[in-house]
């Protein structure tokens, strides 16, 4: 069983900053990638940023230059630093982790989400 715990959401004014954290625990053999996704009511969950075990990152076009994803060396913690926040960044942000719980069993798990609200 893999557990993801997010923290750091909240209310911030437009132009402000927030940092989200996600800690992964449980039966983990190897983490392949971790990412942050967000979802607003009535829309599909969308990728915000991801990082793989090699350190390569990927960002949605609308957050490039404003958001930075980082992780600890053991890939048990991942962060999302968000700057120059806009009202359209308002969403529930979810942490995702993909990897192996043993050499033959894959996992693809989600946290419960943390609300980010950006006021104009």
Image (tube, grey):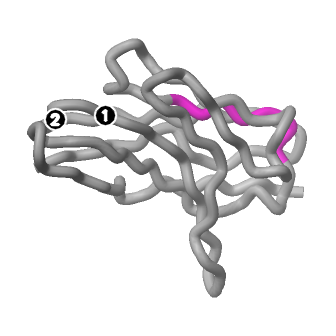
Residue beneath the point at 20% across and 35% down: 25
> Percent from the top left, x then y, of residue 66?
83, 35
Say whether marks 2 and 1 touch (CB < 8 Å).
yes
Q: Which mark is residue 41?
A: none
* Figure quadrant of residue 12: top right
- In the rendered image, the residue lying farthest to the bottom is 42
Q: Would you call the spot at circle 1 few (<14 residues within 10 Å), some (14-19), or many (20 or more)?
A: many
Taking depth in this image into account, of 54 and 44 the one nearest to the observer is: 54
Taking depth in this image into account, of 100 and 111 the one nearest to the observer is: 100
Instruction: From the viewer's perspective, tell me whether residue 106 is left or right of residue 40.
Output: left
* Figure quadrant of residue 23: top left
Residue beneath the point at 23% across and 52% down: 107
- Labels in figure, total: 2
Q: Is residue 115 above or below residue 18?
A: below
The magenta segment = 79-85
As helix, strand or loop, the secondary structure at mark 1 comes to strand
Taking depth in this image into account, of 105 and 110 the one nearest to the observer is: 105
> Percent from the top left, x then y, of residue 63?
80, 45
Residue denoted by label 2? 28
Q: Which mark is residue 31?
A: 1
Instruction: From the viewer's perspective, tell me whether residue 3 is left or right of residue 32.
Output: left
Taking depth in this image into account, of 60 and 112 the one nearest to the observer is: 60
């Amino acid at each position: 069983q893999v557990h993801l715990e997010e923290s750091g959401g909240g209310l911030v004014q437009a132009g402000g900053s927030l940092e989200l954290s996600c800690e992964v625990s449980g039966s983990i053999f190897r983490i392949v990638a971790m990412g942050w996704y967000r979802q607003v009511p009535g829309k599909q969950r969308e990728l915000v940023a991801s990082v793989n075990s090699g350190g390569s990152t990927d960002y949605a076009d609308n957050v490039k230059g404003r958001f930075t994803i980082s992780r600890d060396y053991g890939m048990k913690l991942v962060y999302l630093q968000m700057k120059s926040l806009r009202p359209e960044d308002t969403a529930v942000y979810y942490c995702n982790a993909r990897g192996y719980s043993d050499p033959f069993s894959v996992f693809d798990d989600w946290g419960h989400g943390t609300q980010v609200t950006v006021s104009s």
